[in-house]
Image (tube, rainbow, N blue to C red):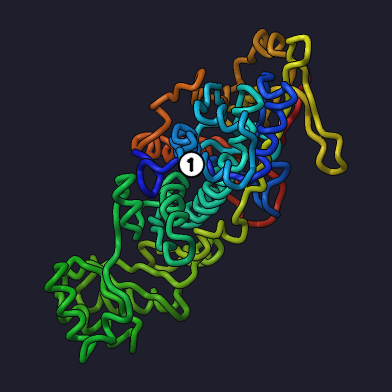
Amino acid sequence: MSTNPTNSMSTALLTDMYEYTMLDAALQDGTANRRCVFEVYTRRLPQGRRYGVVAGTGRLIEAIQNFQPSQDDIAFLADRNIVSTASIAWLENYHFSGTIRGYREGEIFFPNSPVLQVEGTFAECTLLETLILSILNYDSAVASAASRMVSAANGRPCMDMGARRTNEWAAVSAARSAIIGGFSGTSNLQAAKMYGIPAIGTAAHCFTLLHDSERDAFVSQIQALGSNTTLLTDTYSIEEAVATAVEVAGPHLGGVRIDSGDLAALAQQVRNQLDALGASEAKITVTNDLDEFAIAALQNAPVDSYGVGTQLVTGSGAPTCSMVYKLVEREGSDGNMIPVAKRSQNKATVPGRKIAFRSYEYKLATAEHVLSGSPGALASFQVPDNWRDLLVTYMLNGEATNAWTGKEAMLAAREHRAQSLSELPLSAMSLMNGDPTIPTLEHIL
């Protein structure tokens, strides 16, 4: 189930030009085939956040499988003189043949967690940098925000209504990420079709304004969708709209939506009115630029579900996770793998490939453990009984593991997020500014 708009589009130009120019230079100087290990991580969580949620990896694996320059792509690179003739010949046979490991989708991550590890030749790995970061940064940002909103909702369903607040294809990936973050449905039909997500939606204010009266609009909607539909009640007077809704639909009215005003007070008023009119089973959905803080403020209000738009698809103020893609190990001229690192001020990196575990005490997570060292040292590490291995294999020698892509993988990621979050201290669910809920401890073997 591909995430590409055309289902067959090459992803080879969804990248920055310097990745191709680096490829070209490395092919010319003879370093292109050196084995390398790149890692993706974030140096910090967004201000005040306690954790992040990995999302987008399933989409990424599909995108990497389609990362094969078409003849049009190659002609474009040649016409612009971006790469040399030798690189053009190399690109004609390009296919990623390396190995990708990382945190599974839905896993919780923290600063310096090695959420993805890409191993292969420099030539094939460097081309993937922008594609990897653009997918993981955005999808993880949406999933992280969605997870906070779901926690704030405390069991009441949250629905994605953010399609009109972002790029048309970003909306599709946002809907998928929202599901991983714990949301229950989406208004985006393309996402519903591609991923089997429950689709939700009824009518907007314009539908009411189209008709000669609110009653006419409600009658029309009920005739089309049945009495179990949800009617929008704040085009004019909410009190009058609720009365009309119950009069038209009867006591089996499905629900009403409130999209403006003091949502807590209005929800209480509407709940009492619905009950008094005999529509005690009718549900109340609220919308209107909700975020996790607004949802938390409505915990004591008689609200049954939340529709979230702008704040979801923009990561609720953190539209990126600031993940980076860094070379940590490469083959030397003698054929041996050697660790490498940047020393830049405030941007220094930890050399060497990593493995990662989470330790537990009394079934609660106590720390994230990131271990670096030679391949031999990492392979011989004896894992303590109370540590959980966080890395899974997504691709091995260029072959994808199908368990991590498609609808079932998305649903499994949703369940995994809920399980992983339940294993964290309760401070993880706090919306107050604070440090990551568990520390990341780095070990050198």
Pointer 1 local density, CA inside 10 Å: few below 14, some 14–19, many at least 20: many
Query: Nearest the camera: 293 or 53?
Result: 53
Q: Which residue: 57% across, 22% down?
A: 389
Locate residue 23, reporting x and y percent: 66, 32
Q: How many marks?
A: 1
**Residue in the image at 61% along x and 22% along y:** 120
Vertically, is 383 above or below 80?
above
How far from the left and from the top, in percent, is residue 274? 26, 76
Give amino acid for label 1.
Thr
Q: Is residue 359 left or right of residue 1?
A: right
Q: Is residue 438 left or right of residue 136?
A: right
Question: For numbered disc 1, what is the local secondary structure?
Answer: loop
Compared to residue 90, the image places residue 267 above or below, namely below
**Image quadrant in which you'd find residue 154:** bottom left
Q: Nearer the viewer, residue 196 or 109?
A: 196
**Residue 10 appears in the rendering:** yes
Q: Nearer the viewer, residue 260 or 343?
A: 343
Q: For mark 1, what is the residue?
A: 11
Q: Quadrant of the N terminus?
A: top left
In which quarter of the view is residue 163 placed?
Answer: bottom left
The C terminus sits in image quarter: top right
Give coordinates of residue 403: x percent, y percent. Answer: 39, 27
Q: Residue 122 placed where, x, y %?
A: 66, 26
Picture residue at 75% right of the left edge, 25% below the top: 29
- The answer to whether one can see residue 418 in this image is no
Residue 34: image quadrant is top right
